[in-house]
Amino acid sequence: MFIFKNRLIRAFAAIACGIALSVTSSITFAQAENYPNRPVRIIVPFPPGGTSDIMGRLMAEQLSKQLGQQFVVENKGGAGGVIGTTEAARAKPDGYTLLLSGIGSNAILHGYSPKPSYDSKKDFIHISQLAAGPNVLVVNPAFPAKTFKEFIAYAKANPGKFSYGQVNASSGHLSSEFLKQAADIDIVGIPYRGGAPALNDVLANQVPGMFTNQDAAYPHVKSGKLRALVVTSAERNPLYPDVPTVAESGYPGFAAVSWTGLSAPAGTPQAIVTKLETAMRKAFSQPKARERLESMGFVVVASTSKEYSHFVNQEIDHWIDVIKKSGIKFQ
């Protein structure tokens, strides 16, 4: 009798569990079917006006068109992207708070001490990588090196004498650290609060050069006010067809690109993630949306969620290794 009762209890429990799972599944499906039924915010963890802000607004515009609801950018700058990214990580995982994720706040900062208050591998679902672009090593025309080969020769002959503008924890900063290790050169970073003031000082020949995003450098390179020596992508960039890559210049395997994408707090229903992923991929498969990014020197990726998650994890591990070898600390 006792055994029969236990079996009966277990049977009822299994049925109740099945009903609960079915109800939960139905609710999740209904949420995804109706999503989005109110405005969605995309947190951009940097101030207005920069490359990240442009990317966030472009995503918001395209997602609004695809999904028929307003997607709104909220700039939450500070601490190298930590403040806004932390807010996104702690948001309710319902698809109504998303994050413009990127190399600095979602990869590079994981190698610093102290580490950020979130874990990009665990606290986010990465929906789709939007685009990637190289950093460019630019110098003032007064600098004696005319080519990357001449730059390396100068750096080796004059250890510690080449100084460059540096924004801590940026892709440009880490590109320079990676190059120091790959080429075994001693060059010195001068910290700046932002890329714009650093670039202004290179233009004024206050510092001889820096690594910066390709879109920021391009107008000055085109006008002849700066000289581009090398790009950090694995392949040459369409905006800089005559500028070699680091990899083809004697350092095979060297690649350091700035990237951005769309992410959501962990726990966001998979059906909503899939809906957003599909909308991103559809939007940025269209020529007009792609052209806007390509005109700034970006390579459009529009990856799947699985591909983007794998990529982010690889980037975290890679930059942790570079930072560990360099010994740099986040101040």
Image: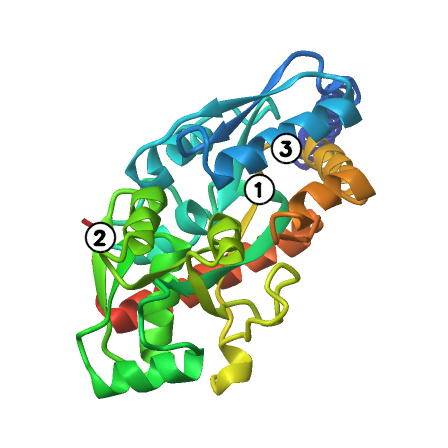
The numbered mark, 1 or 3, whose residue comes first in the sequence reads: 3
Question: Considering the numbered disc 1 on the image, is that residue within a helix, a strand or a loop?
Answer: strand
Q: Which of marks 1 and 3 is in front?
A: 3
Above or below, 89 relative to 235: above
* Residue 155 coordinates in the image, percent (x, y): 27, 81
Alpha carbon separation for disc pair 1 and 3: 20 Å
Q: Residue, x 73% and y 20% (percent of image)?
A: 35
Question: Considering the numbered disc 3 on the image, is that residue within a helix, a strand or a loop?
Answer: helix
Above or below, 214 relative to 26: below
User: Label 3, on which residue?
Assistant: 58
Q: Residue, x 64% and y 27% (percent of image)?
A: 60
With 265 as the anchor, is 118 left or right in this view?
left
Q: Is 57 or 85 nearer to us in this picture?
A: 57
- The label on residue 125 is 1
The amino acid on which the numbered mark 3 sits, given as a three-letter code, is: Leu
Q: Do we see residue 253 in this rendering? A: no
The amino acid on which the numbered mark 2 sits, given as a three-letter code, is: Pro
The numbered mark, 2 or 1, whose residue comes first in the sequence reads: 1
